[in-house]
Image: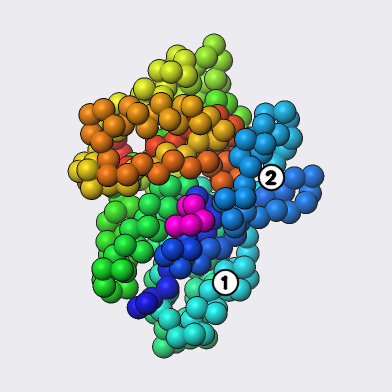
Amino acid sequence: MTFAIATDTSANLPTELLQKDAITVIPFSYFIDEQEFTCLDESGFNGEAYYQMIRAGKRVTTAQINPQRYLEKLTPILARGQDLLFVGMSSGISGSFHCAQMAAAQLREEFPERRICMIDTLGASLGEGILVLKAAELRAQGMSLTGVQHQLMRMRERMYQVFTVDDLMHLRRSGRLSNAAAVVGTVLQIKPLLKGNEKGQIVSFAKLRGRKRAVAALAEKYDALVEHAEEQIVGIAHADCPKDAEALAELLKKNHPPKQILNVVYEPVTGSHVGPGTLALFFLGGEGVRGK
């Protein structure tokens, strides 16, 4: 293996895929009643119980992890003589990537003979995870670390990330919604459409009446903006709304069926910010697609 790949739990990838590609994962933390939890094994996460708990009023909080956690996970990789590609959560919604950069600076001093490449995906959930999978695919094909880095930096600009939520309260409370002041609350069954913008920030750009219309609008964005769907892994992430996720998957198959649809439950950290009932779609479009 020419170089190691590491990511964080925000990438939202199934455990079997991480293990198959020998990807190291940095765990993010969340807190319930001041008790700290991490979710390194997605297969053991009961998403239905978790999001029902939040619906019932339980407050989940998160905290930015410090550089030490990155050092603990990444140092052994470099110590065994491997170079490193780290693919991380958007700096537009979290300071975690900055902490990863701080750790990388320290590691470069400690291991000057090793190469460390850092990718800010400007994404979260499968908007990050699909880039991780592409990195593993390119590595398996024999591409160099520099080549993979260049491919992922181009790919992140084409990653369209669009989603709808049941309640904007969670994004507002955690400060994750960049244009919160311009958004009217979700009343009278008005459902917002949100996306990741060019800076990796979350912005609301439309409001639709009714959940069914919002789900259809996600598919419409896909039909309008997707490029070379037949070559893509397209991502769907949901926060305990599996029927909506299945309905969206069927809509995607109608006009531009993708090579594969990866359908996951939102991992608990990002899920606590977007809230129960969130439905998100991740796919590649053309140049400048993040601004559309």
Residue 200, above or below 219:
below
Residue at mark 1: 73
Label 2 CA crowd tier, 10 Å (few <14, some 14–19, many 20+): some
* Amino acid on which disc 2 is placed: Thr
- Residue 286: tell me if it is visible: no
On the rendered structure, is 214 left or right of 172? left
Q: Which stretch is magenta?
A: 13-17
Q: Residue at horizontal 43%, vertical 47%?
A: 126
Does residue 14 show up magenta in the picture? yes
Q: Mark 2: which secondary structure?
A: strand
On the rendered structure, is 175 left or right of 36? left
Q: Main secondary structure of the magenta part?
A: helix
Q: Quick one: which residue is furthest to the top in this view?
A: 188
Q: Mark 1: which secondary structure?
A: helix
Indicate the colouring scheme: rainbow
Residue at mark 2: 61
Labels 2 and 1: the sequence-earlier one: 2
Coordinates of residue 157 in the picture (x, y in percent): 30, 50
Q: Residue at horizontal 22%, vertical 43%?
A: 230
Q: Quadrant of the N terminus?
A: bottom left
Does residue 228 show up magenta in the picture? no
Q: Quadrant of the C terminus?
A: top left
Look at discs 2 and 1 and give the one toward the viewer.
Answer: 1
- Residue 2: tell me if it is visible: yes
